[in-house]
């Protein structure tokens, strides 16, 4: 069995998976969203203190499995250094005490593996990763063969939802709030610019759109309920149109057989629908993770760790490092 530990941001999560069958035997997650909501975003110091309390508690729940462990998979990058350290410190202690190898897991790679929980991998795979920290298109050929085809020049897709929600005083995390509000709004009342629409660049940018929303919010203050819903709808429409325009260019080049959307924002129904259409147009199969595995969780970390274990991709417990950034 392999133990999975996740603490890259505001979710403390621990799981145990069976290596041979990939079965998830135990999986728990404590989300800190409610604690951070009052600040309108994640407060790193608070997140780290909550992980320090919750991770050992979750580990204790996994106690019946601990004698059967063969390895530990822990997220070590990218993420908030102070929160990553909490998970890594727990992995180090267990590794030294029980003589278990550590697989240091790249959080972005773990999101890709959220597709393969209790399943075999599908490669090659074109992947759109949309989360609070990243907006990327990845050409994935295997565990250690991942090429970045596009990334964001500034804010990420999920982050822009969080910031727009904050501007309108709607709470955190903004993704699901804006998505629900957009359903009630008129996406055509306001005309927001689609980022990099006239640029040949294959990249993403959300800061310009965010500023356009800021101006709209200022102009219509105090916002009535209908205007809030119309702004949410117009913003979501432009944000997704941008994803679609750039992804379409990549589809033209790569013509993928298999395409996936992963990351917390892949839960967005409008995104799923838009890409289902794009895939139908190009004859590609769309792969999505179970909704429970879209946001951060330990199950995807352990699943990635199973492939790392098979390749003996181990990191020394005494020298494992955390990093806010990570490349493939
Ligand atoms: O993957 P994740 O849990 O954490 C990171 O690795 O960043 O993603 C969280 C992000 C947040 O920015 C959240 O607002 C966004 O995903 N998100 C959504 C939706 N659900 C979550 N964005 C748009 N629509 C949603 N339904
Ligand atoms: Zn994530």
Image: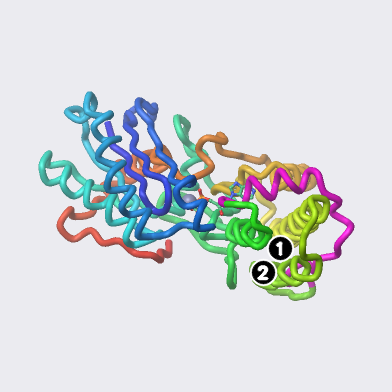
Identify which residue is drawn at 70% across, 72% down.
211
Picture quadrant of residue 188: bottom right
Disc 2: which residue: 202
Give the percent coordinates (x, y) of residue 234. 80, 57
Magenta region: 172-197
Identify which residue is drawn at 65% across, 47% down.
177
Give the percent coordinates (x, y) of residue 120. 47, 34
Q: Nearer the viewer, residue 313 or 30?
A: 30
Q: Pick out the residue farthest to the right.
A: 189
Disc 1: which residue: 246
Identify which residue is drawn at 70% across, 47% down.
179
Secondary structure type for disc 1 = helix
Picture quadrant of residue 222: bottom right
Quadrant placement of the C terminus: bottom left
Residue 38 relative to residue 97: left or right: right
Quadrant placement of the N terminus: top left
């Amino acid at each position: 069995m392999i133990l999975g530990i996740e603490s890259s941001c505001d979710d403390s999560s621990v799981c145990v998976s069976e290596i041979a069958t990939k079965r998830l035997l135990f999986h728990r997650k404590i989300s800190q969203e409610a604690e951070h909501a009052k600040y309108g975003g994640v407060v790193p110091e608070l997140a780290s203190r909550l992980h320090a309390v919750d991770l050992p508690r979750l580990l204790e729940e996994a106690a019946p499995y601990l004698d059967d462990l063969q390895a530990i998979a822990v997220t070590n990058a990218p993420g908030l250094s102070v929160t990553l350290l909490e998970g890594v410190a727990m992995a180090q202690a267990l590794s030294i005490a029980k003589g278990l190898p550590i697989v240091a897991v790249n959080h972005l790679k773990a999101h890709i593996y959220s597709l393969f929980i209790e399943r075999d991998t599908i490669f090659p795979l074109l992947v759109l990763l949309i989360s609070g920290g990243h907006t990327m298109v990845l050409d994935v050929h295997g565990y250690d063969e991942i090429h970045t085809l596009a990334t964001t020049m500034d804010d990420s897709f999920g982050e822009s939802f969080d910031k727009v929600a904050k501007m309108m005083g709607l709470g955190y995390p903004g993704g699901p709030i804006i998505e629900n509000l957009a359903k009630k709004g008129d996406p055509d009342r306001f005309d927001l610019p689609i980022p990099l629409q006239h640029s040949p660049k294959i990249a993403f940018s959300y800061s310009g759109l965010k500023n356009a929303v800021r101006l709209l919010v200022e102009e219509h203050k105090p916002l009535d309920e209908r205007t809030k819903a119309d702004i949410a709808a117009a913003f979501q429409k432009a944000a997704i149109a941008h994803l679609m325009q750039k992804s379409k260019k990549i589809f033209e080049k790569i013509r993928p057989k298999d395409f996936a959307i992963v990351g917390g924002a892949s839960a967005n129904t409008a995104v799923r629908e838009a890409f289902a259409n794009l895939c139908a147009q190009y004859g590609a199969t769309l792969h999505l993770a179970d909704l429970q595995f879209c946001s951060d969780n330990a199950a995807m970390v352990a699943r990635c760790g199973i492939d790392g274990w098979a390749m003996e991709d181990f990191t020394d417990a005494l020298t494992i490092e955390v990093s806010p950034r990570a490349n493939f």
